[in-house]
């Protein structure tokens, strides 16, 4: 069912941008995908493929669909630069960070976000849901930033002795949702008797080093504002990444959000 929803939505969005097969039967359309690692396995990308196929765009016939195998977070900028050089017809983004990077790169090429934007209006990507008035449109698949307050409450309920919380977030500035979520967490925490120690993270190395320095002596738990920046420490570095240090210190942690389509907390 979810796959069908994504397929139909993507087909409709591409029609909005007038990428019509009927207009130029002989033309090959180029669509570039931008997002975190393991994109091929994500439900949204499977829906994208199905939606394009249903709309008449067939790979190796009239469609060139580029889904890069991203190995490190910093590759996103070079990938979107390549899309511009190759005169890509549309860029499909997965997550707020990828959308932000694409927006910085182009105001002309249509950008279609399919996951990870909690509130595209507040994040400044579009003017309104009805009339984006930019080269960006798409599907908002996450709850609004205000839900983060409830997540903090649930974290406190799950860990009654929680008092000191280490707050990890992406401080690179590409994803506006980080600021919106931080505002909610900052206002909610004191009402629950929590004090937060903010740890702004700008690189994978910094994320790993920061968590390695955390112990039960300086915090009672870790709250992570979900971001593709933390995908690598969790999934790529394995035993040297974020998860083992947290477990070795026996510290409770909250991933900030969970992607129900993929079972992780990264947009």
Image (tube, helix red, strand yellow):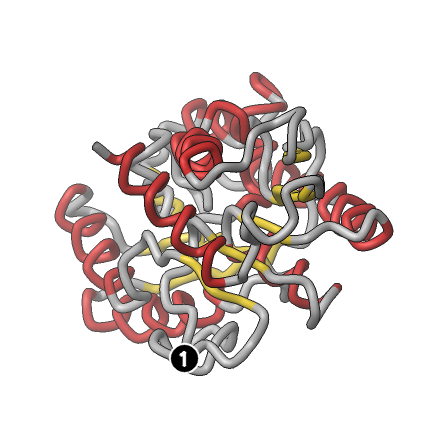
In the image, farthest residue toward the right: 85
From the top left corner, tell me how far across and down residue 177 is, in percent. 46, 65
Residue lying at 56% horizontally and 30% vertically, measured from the top left = 58
Q: Is residue 84 above or below residue 254?
A: below
Residue lying at 69% horizontally and 72% vertically, measured from the top left = 107
Pick the residue in front: 80 or 72. 80
From the top left corner, tell me how far across and down residue 213 is, in percent. 58, 40
* Total labels drawn: 1
Residue lying at 28% horizontally and 55% vertically, measured from the top left = 163
- Residue 52 visible in rendering: yes
Pick the residue in front: 108 or 181. 108
- For residue 48, side relative to residue 92 (left or right): left
Q: Is residue 138 above or below residue 135?
A: above
* SS for callout 1: loop
Q: Is residue 111 above or below residue 65?
A: below
Residue 266 lies in quadrant: top left
Residue lying at 42% horizontally and 47% vertically, measured from the top left = 10
Residue 50 lies in quadrant: top left
Which quadrant of the rendered structure holds the N terminus? top left
- For residue 190, side relative to residue 214 (left or right): left
- Residue 210 visible in rendering: no
């Amino acid at each position: 069912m979810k796959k069908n929803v994504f397929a139909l939505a993507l087909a409709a969005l591409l029609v909005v941008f007038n990428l019509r097969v009927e207009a130029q039967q002989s033309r090959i359309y180029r669509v570039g995908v931008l997002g975190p690692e393991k994109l091929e396995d994500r439900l949204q990308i499977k829906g994208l493929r199905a939606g394009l196929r249903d709309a008449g765009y067939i790979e190796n016939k009239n469609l060139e669909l580029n889904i890069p195998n991203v190995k490190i977070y910093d590759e996103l900028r070079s990938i979107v630069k390549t899309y511009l050089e190759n005169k890509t017809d549309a860029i499909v983004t997965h997550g707020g960070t990828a959308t932000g990077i694409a927006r910085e790169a182009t105001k002309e090429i249509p950008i279609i976000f399919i996951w990870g934007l909690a509130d595209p209006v507040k994040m400044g990507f579009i003017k309104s849901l009805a009339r984006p008035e930019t080269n960006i449109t798409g599907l908002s698949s996450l709850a609004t930033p205000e839900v983060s307050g409830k997540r903090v409450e649930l974290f406190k309920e799950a860990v009654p002795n929680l008092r000191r919380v280490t707050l990890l977030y992406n401080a690179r500035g590409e994803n506006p949702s980080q600021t919106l979520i931080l505002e909610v967490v900052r206002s909610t925490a004191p009402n629950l008797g929590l004090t937060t120690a903010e740890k702004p993270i700008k690189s994978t190395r910094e994320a790993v080093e920061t968590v390695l320095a955390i112990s039960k002596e300086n915090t009672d738990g870790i709250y992570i504002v979900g971001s593709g920046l933390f995908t690598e420490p969790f999934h790529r570095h394995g035993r040297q990444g974020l998860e083992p240090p947290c477990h070795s210190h026996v510290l409770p942690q909250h991933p900030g959000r969970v992607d129900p389509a993929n079972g992780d907390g990264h947009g």
